[in-house]
Image: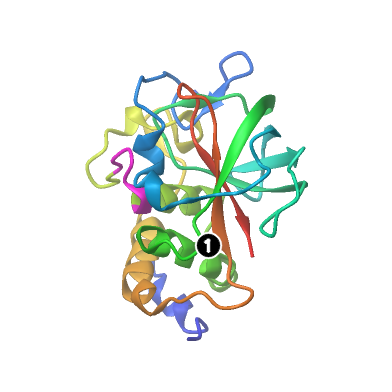
Amino acid sequence: MTYKSISAYFLIIPALVLTFSSCKDNTTSAPIDDSLDPIHELTFIPGSENTTITVNRSSETYFSVEFKNIGSNNIMGDKTSEGWCIDWLKPIDSNGGVYNNIKLYSTFNVEQWNPLNYLLNIKEELKADDPGITQLEIQVAVWSLRGFPEFDLNKINIQDLPGRMQNDGQLTFDADKVNQILQIVENGHKDFSFTPGTKFAVIAELPADVQTIITVVQ
């Protein structure tokens, strides 16, 4: 499938409290399973139980995440990579925050993650066809596709959004572009299949009071 025609679709308090920024500035007590659901279908990456991650903001993706101390496996090793939030209700230290003993999980060929993984495979082409798409539109699409916790852009109160997503009650991203991205994913993800070189999300299971994040491997 080619996405050269995608451009035709597109007619359409920054949150840093001390060193903590967020998908959300206040914490909740929701269990980790809420954002990993259904966790029983994810694959634990052997040797990843002692992973150390360092999280920073990025101007290209939502986070830049450094992974260290990953044991030998055939999915990913130590690296610095893009990061995305999948739990917008919880905070994270994105100013060099370090988290130890983190387990990693693969979403490779997990059906419930196909829409999100499809987005990860086409997002660069989407951005190339419409330079107005930024990491913020991609991040909001990620929240919308996961749904754990629920995120409905068309119903949410703007003031409830994380600081990077709104300023003085105004969105800092283009909601029309987000909705068009979601429509493209809806139209295309059913034909998505895993082949050599396919990108997919790897989940970092952070503490229960910290947002869950993903990185991308292929």
Q: Please check the rendered image and state whether residue 46 is part of the magenta-colored stretch, yes or no.
A: no
Three-letter amino acid code at the position of disc 1:
Leu
Q: Quadrant of residue 145?
A: bottom left
Q: Residues within 10 Å of mark 1 (few under 14, many from 20)?
A: some
Q: How is the image coloured?
A: rainbow
User: Residue placed at 52% from the left, 59% from the top?
Assistant: 133
Tell me the magenta residue range: 145-151
Q: From this view, report whether residue 124 is shown above or below residue 93.
A: below
Disc 1, SS: helix
**With 35 as the anchor, is 7 left or right in this view?**
right
Q: Nearer the viewer, residue 174 or 116?
A: 116
Q: From this view, report whether residue 109 is shown above or below residue 1.
A: above
Q: Which residue is mark 1?
A: 120
Picture coordinates of residue 120 (x, y %)?
Answer: 53, 62
Picture coordinates of residue 101 (x, y %)?
Answer: 65, 28
Looking at the image, can residue 68 be seen? yes
Q: Residue furthest left?
A: 155
Q: From this view, report whether residue 66 is shown above or below residue 181.
A: above
Q: Quadrant of residue 75?
A: bottom right
Q: Please check the rendered image and state whether residue 147 is part of the magenta-colored stretch, yes or no.
A: yes
